[in-house]
Image (cartoon, rainbow, N blue to C red):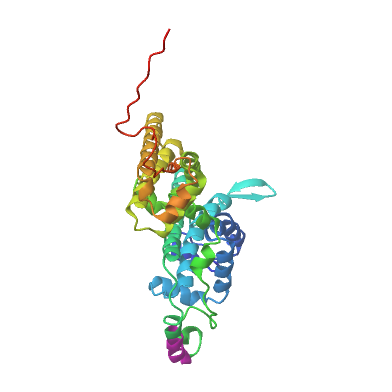
Amino acid sequence: MIIRTLQELRLYNTSHALDDIEPLMGIIDNVEKDILVDKLGKSLYTALCSHYKNVDTDLFVKAVQEDSLDNDMDVLLRLSQAVVANEVINHAIALHLVSLNNSGLNMGSAEDYAVASKDAVETSRKELYQLTHIAINTLLEWLEEKAATPNPDPSSVDGEGSADNEQEGDGGEGEESGTVHGSEASDAPDIAALWRESPFYWQTTTLLIPSAVVLREFWDTFDNREKFVRMLPDIRYAQDIIADEVGEQWLEYLVETAFKGTDDAHLKHIINRLRRSCVALLESRTDVIKNDKERKSRAYDEGLKYLRRACDYMVNHQNDLPQDALVKFATSPLYVAPPEPEEEQPQCHCDKGWKNNRKGNVMFVMPRKA
């Protein structure tokens, strides 16, 4: 688990007045497994839990309050705790509002507190739900940025960092060294590499619409990663429609090229049109973002229109594609094979005798006698 003190819980929700975190430990464990593990992936979640075991929580809380975290794993810990903390309080409200004893079900109350009304409870739970999903969006956005950033050169960065640590680390551990770790931390894991093992990473890298940022270029969803994640099955469905028209292998090449980036103007144009088609087909299918039936019908027609335009462009500019792209395009049903060269007829170089079809030839036919 990644939360073990009330001080950490209060970093993200100050409205509770709990004096013991023990009753919440089971909820914390369940919430982490339900909504955090799949976002991080098991490998990164395990690495985060191992990192948390060495964290001095008092120093960590102070560093968060002062906004002085300078370690990526500590930043990941803070972002992950924000996801868990609000959802834990949300679950606790529902579970602790009613108590069970030998007399039956009872409404929880206290002498110096009034019992919350039904409307107050619903309002509080809705707000906590929103805060949880905002935190998930922030976490996924940060992970996307980490995965998109090239790894630094170990010889230039790690070496310098080690030298600095040797000079500044003579003051001891814990508070004296100014770190949030109670003991000397081991080498930090590669967050981006571990997150690439998460299903939330590999699903997006095989799609025409790999992130909420790309989606917003064609449909404004306010960079909401949470909604984007929920729409992944619908994006896959829309992409399958496109694959049926352009071919699986050719589309896989275009998706890979789009993710890596390209300077070729024709490939950029093709990818842009296919993405526009994919987003329109997505809008016609998904229920994550509400649309009426009329809008969904128009969006479906628009998606097919953009797809036809993309296919026409591929056919018309087939010979303008880079060589490696043309090899992949040859697997597409849209590919038009070049005509086979005609066999050359042997030429006769003799000047004597009759030559058929020679310019100036005249044939005289004698009439047949009856």
Instruction: Give the image quarter of residue 324.
Output: bottom left
Q: Residue at x 44, y 77 (%)?
A: 153
Q: Looking at this view, is 121 or 356 the one in front?
A: 356
260 over 332 or under it: above or below: below
Q: Residue at x 45, y 84 (%)?
A: 159
Membership of 169 in magenta stretch: yes
Check the picture and name the quadrant holding the N terminus. bottom right
Q: Residue 313's spot in the image, x, y percent? A: 35, 42
Q: Is residue 251 visible?
A: no
Q: Residue at x 60, y 57 (%)?
A: 30
47 over 204 or under it: above or below: below
287 over 367 or under it: above or below: below
Q: Residue 83's spot in the image, x, y percent? A: 48, 59
Kindly give the residue lying farthest to the right in the view shown. Answer: 102
Membership of 184 in magenta stretch: no
Check the picture and name the quadrant holding the C terminus. top left
**Magenta segment range?**
161-171
Q: Residue 158's spot in the image, x, y percent? A: 45, 81
Q: Residue 139's spot in the image, x, y percent? A: 45, 60
